Image (cartoon, rainbow, N blue to C red):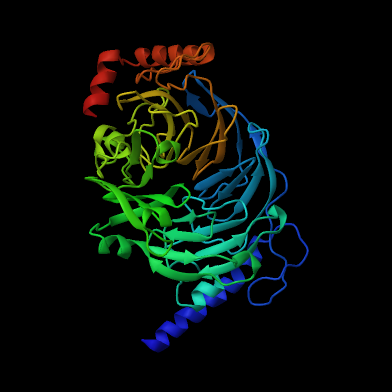
Amino acid sequence: MPSFRAAVLALLLTLAAAGPASAQAPAVPPLTVPGGATDPVPQVPDVAGTTPAGPDAVMSDNVKYLGSIKQDEGLTTGAKVIGNRMFVTSGKNISIYDISDPAKPKNLGGMKANVAWENEEVPTNGKVLAVASDFYSIGVPECVAALAADGCVQLFDVRDPAHIKQVGTIPVANHTAECVLDCQYFYGRAGTIIDARGVLDGKAPTVVGNWIDELEAQGVTEKSCHHIREIRPGVLLTACQPFAAISVNTADGGSPAHPKVLYTGEAAKFVHSARWPRSGRDKFVLIGGEQNFTGRCERNNSEFSVYGAGNVLKGRSTQFQGPISQVPPAGNGVYADGKPVAGALGCSVHWFQEHESFKNGGLVAISEYEDGVRFLQVTRTGQIQEQGYFLSLGSSSSSPKWAGKDDVLYSIDYQRGIDILQWKGKHYVPGKKERNKKRGTNGVTKPQAPTQAQAAQRAALARELHAQGWSPLICSLVARDG
């Protein structure tokens, strides 16, 4: 076995050394990379490559399609908006965009080398950025050499978008990671606590603990963890069963290596993502599940859920209430009604993000793979109602990210790169009246009326079928019985 392992490791290292060469882009000044090499680091193009809006999508009247960015096509999965910059990761790129004009992002630079697998969420403060992987890390020699070929955590200096460089690795597989206390620490899905202090000054990152073990020592056994999110400095919300709010702040009795459990919430199913709006001061907690590769939506077992935090905020309980309400994915349809006939990854609930106006209810954007992006209203009582949608041809939307102004939203899409959308409807904040906004769908997605040319084509086909003996009754029977 030792000789076989050595042979496999040698092969992986050979592939790792050869891989980046094929991805080289325009030349840049030599940079020092880990290991002392001074080879040029391949960069992504300095032009965003935004394509204009086309007729390859259907959407509700309150959604406007502004265009797409295609350079990130290829497992485009996660993004993070920091001020006027958006940081995007995919299976091949780290890309950084200037979104001062959110409808027209400008590429500031990026990196094509040493990027492992998909990075579902993007933990960064705009200075240091982490890429977490638990599938492979063949393109990361440091991780392969440490026998972590199945994944690791990479840390990058992203202060200069045109000259991104890797500044550290942790050879522990983590599906996702989160930036904590202004990225002094990173918390990984597998429980890994990474001390990244000084990493931009040449200090190597280190593992200082395991947050899952720390919670278990306090009587909270976390299962099926997928993510952990910092909701305000030092306070995090886990996406596990159960989900939990924990603190690394001294005032709460915690520390970065020894987080303290504050509250928990029961979840009967897999928790993919958890958010607590308004930095954990809202009366609602938002929870989403996931179930991949279910082409027919009736077979999908994921929901978007609303839990109550009212008693927690009043100090009456350490348990979140609920779920108060749940909704499944949008479902199958005929595409023209904003729903696909079927899919590959399926129509599962995936990442979501509330609008910045959310206050004890309001607007939430959610990605549902082949069901595209759905816009949900959470009422003052925690009920959920769909109010809009965007579905593009060949879509597999992974994550929606609000730009922070002008109601622009970016659909980070596995297949299409980045679709740029603008919300034209209400924000549904309880007690707040809004005028001159497009009406919502109220959960009803009617098929869009055909154009004049489409109607003429349909009529011609109907006449042709009728001449061959077909009738509406026969067509309906065939559709029903095959």
- The residue shown at (38%, 27%) is 361
In this orientation, does residue 216 appear? Answer: yes
Q: Nearer the viewer, residue 33 or 69?
A: 33
Name the spot of residue 319 as percent of width and height, x first.
24, 43
Q: Residue extending furthest bottom?
A: 3
Whether residue 348 is visible to the viewer of this picture, yes or no, is no
| Residue visible at 47% across and 65% down in the picture | 194
Q: Which of 281/470 is in front?
A: 281
- Left or right side of 281 for 116: right
289 sits to left or right of 101: left
Q: Quadrant of the N terminus?
A: bottom left
Residue 296's spot in the image, x, y percent? 29, 37
Q: Residue furthest right?
A: 29
- Placement of the C terminus among the 4 image quadrants: top left
Between residues 2 and 214, which one lies in front from this camera angle?
214
Whether residue 281 is situated above or below residue 236 in the rendered picture: above
Q: Is residue 61 above or below residue 137?
A: above
Label tally: 0
Locate residue 222 relative to residue 165 in the image: left or right.
left
* Vertical arrangement, residue 376 with respect to residue 418, above or below: above
Q: In the figure, is residue 446 to the left or right of 140?
A: left
Give the residue displayed 56% in from the left and 40% down from the top: 418
Rendered location of residue 182, percent (x, y): 54, 54
- The percent position of residue 434, horizontal first and vertical second, equals 49, 14
Q: Residue at x 25, y 36 (%)?
A: 323
The one of 454 and 166 positioned closer to us in this rendering: 166
